[in-house]
Image: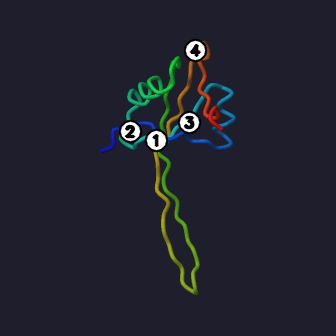
Amino acid sequence: MSNRILIEPHLTEKATEQMYEGKYSFVVNLAATKPQIRAAVERRYEGVRVTNVRTQIVPGKRRRQFRQGSMIEGRTSGFKKAIVEIDPEYAEIDFFEDV
């Protein structure tokens, strides 16, 4: 098992809108628990205090592709998503600082 808890930020249109409310989305390890996610966010982003963590397992989707008269079926892989609420009195997370 990988020791890496936070894999990457999950940036979608809805997640970008939730950032204004102090909610940030991350793709996390499938075996990660809520206390581990809270500790990983507070450790990675200095000055941030997490107030709430919600998790969701996003299932993979079926994909079909037609190639030279035949159909190829496959699946995308599923992942675990965590929505982390940050205390507004503390620092904010800026995903776009290096862009």
Circle 2 Cα neighbour tier, 10 Å, few/some/many (<14 / 14–19 / ≥20):
few
Query: Mark 1 falls on what kind of element?
Result: strand
Q: Which disc is residue 90 wearing?
A: 4
Query: Mark 2 falls on what kind of element?
Result: loop
- Locate residue 17 relative to residue 6 in the image: left or right: right
Question: Is residue 7 or residue 20 the one in the foreground?
Answer: 7
Q: Amino acid at mark 2?
A: Arg
Cα–Cα span, label 3 and label 1 = 11 Å
Of badges 3 and 4, nearer the viewer stands 4
Q: Which residue is mark 3?
A: 25
Q: Amino acid at mark 4?
A: Tyr
Circle 1 Cα neighbour tier, 10 Å, few/some/many (<14 / 14–19 / ≥20):
few
Q: Amino acid at mark 3?
A: Ser
Query: Mark 3 falls on what kind of element?
Result: strand
Q: Are marks 2 and 4 in contact (CB under 8 Å)?
A: no
Q: What's the residue at 41%, 25% (across, down)?
A: 39
Question: Is residue 95 or residue 13 the one in the foreground?
Answer: 95
Q: Amino acid at mark 1?
A: Ile
Quarter placement of the C terminus? top right
Q: What's the residue at 53%, 19% (across, down)?
A: 48
Of badges 3 and 1, nearer the viewer stands 1
Of badges 3 and 2, nearer the viewer stands 2
Cα–Cα span, label 3 and label 4 = 18 Å
**Figure check: 32 above or below 42:** below
Comes first in the chain, label 2 or label 4:
2
Q: Which disc is residue 94 wearing?
A: none
Q: Which residue is mark 1?
A: 7
Q: Which residue is mark 2?
A: 4
Q: Position of residue 53 (x, y in %)?
A: 49, 28
Cα–Cα span, label 3 and label 2 = 16 Å
Q: Position of residue 17 (x, y in %)?
A: 69, 35
